[in-house]
Amino acid sequence: MNQTKLTRKCEYTTPKAAELLKVNPQQLRRLLHSRGVQPCGTYRNPHYRSGPPCPLWRGQDVIALRGTNAYGEIVKRNSRPKRRFEQIEADRHAKFVKLDREELLHRAAEGIFNLNRYAKHASCRKEHREEIYSLKSRLIACFCALGLARDVHHHLQDVAARMCFGCDGLGRRDDDERCGRCFGSGNWEEATTLVFVVFHFVIGARPHCWHQPKSQVFFDYVETAEPEKWKGMPAEKEVKLSPQKFAEAKSLMRYVVENLNPDRHCED
């Protein structure tokens, strides 16, 4: 049994501090951020050599969280009996049934607008990001099947070649043998042009625009304008939907694509 205790003089990683406070790492980060706590140091990311360094937290800052109302609410919430996902989903869907079509579409669009932004944040877990993008694909297909698309065209993004670090771009190793990573080309990845499909919708009198990699669009569409060069979007933008509402937003999107899409096979 782990007998480790929090002490003021120690420095803790995010997972260790979360474990000792009996919260999850995401909850710990939100608590620290709400109090404006800054890391006291960093250490090398053990999972990604080229990733950003991981933060270390002062024991006194972590201990201080125990005296906050926000921490008390999290502990109280975490101690409640967990309901099965199927029951939670059914309860939410029972509420969605009472909404009219326009309200459902408006809420679904607002949900993916925010979640699509959150997927680009460093704090978004890989599993969560993949789920968001899957729902985004299904929702775009649903909106198109409902005839809500106002404009569809391609954006072309040029991506430069990535130099092979095995031979520093030379194509050969120190022993003058051909590099086995890039097979003599000097590039780990060659230059390419990515193609995105840009969908413009008007939903609930509000315009929406989403990019989708062409390789992930599995339904027919008609381009309404010529392709344009594109430099890409900023990595992170403001998310106006609170994290507590993420699960409900995803549930509503699932409800919409399952119940309002007149052409369900477009999702597959």
Image: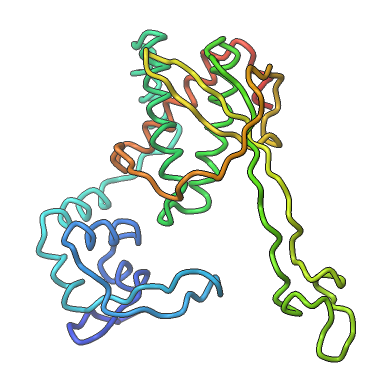
Query: For the point 75% across and 74% down, which residue is it?
Result: 169
Name which quarter of the figure residue 123 lies in: bottom left
Query: For the point 11% across and 60% down, which residue is it?
Result: 68
- Count numbered badges in the picture: 0
Apparent side of residue 99 relative to residue 75 in the rendered image (left or right): right
Q: Residue furthest right?
A: 177
- Please provide percent x and percent y for residue 34: 19, 57
- Please provide percent x and percent y for residue 140: 56, 24
Name which quarter of the figure residue 134 lies in: top right
Apparent side of residue 49 relative to residue 92 in the rendered image (left or right): right
Query: For the point 43% across and 56% down, which residue is it?
Result: 122
Apparent side of residue 267 relative to residue 5 in the rendered image (left or right): right
Q: Nearer the viewer, residue 228 or 196?
A: 228
Q: Nearer the viewer, residue 97 or 156?
A: 156
- Please provide percent x and percent y for residue 246: 37, 38
Query: For the point 89% across and 79% down, which residue is it?
Result: 178
- Please provide percent x and percent y for residue 142: 56, 19
> Is residue 69 placed above or below 100 in the rendered structure?
below
Locate the N terminus by quadrant. bottom left
> Is residue 124 placed above or below 204 in the rendered structure?
below
Q: Nearer the viewer, residue 12 or 40?
A: 40
Locate the C terminus by quadrant. top right
Name which quarter of the figure residue 244 lies in: top left
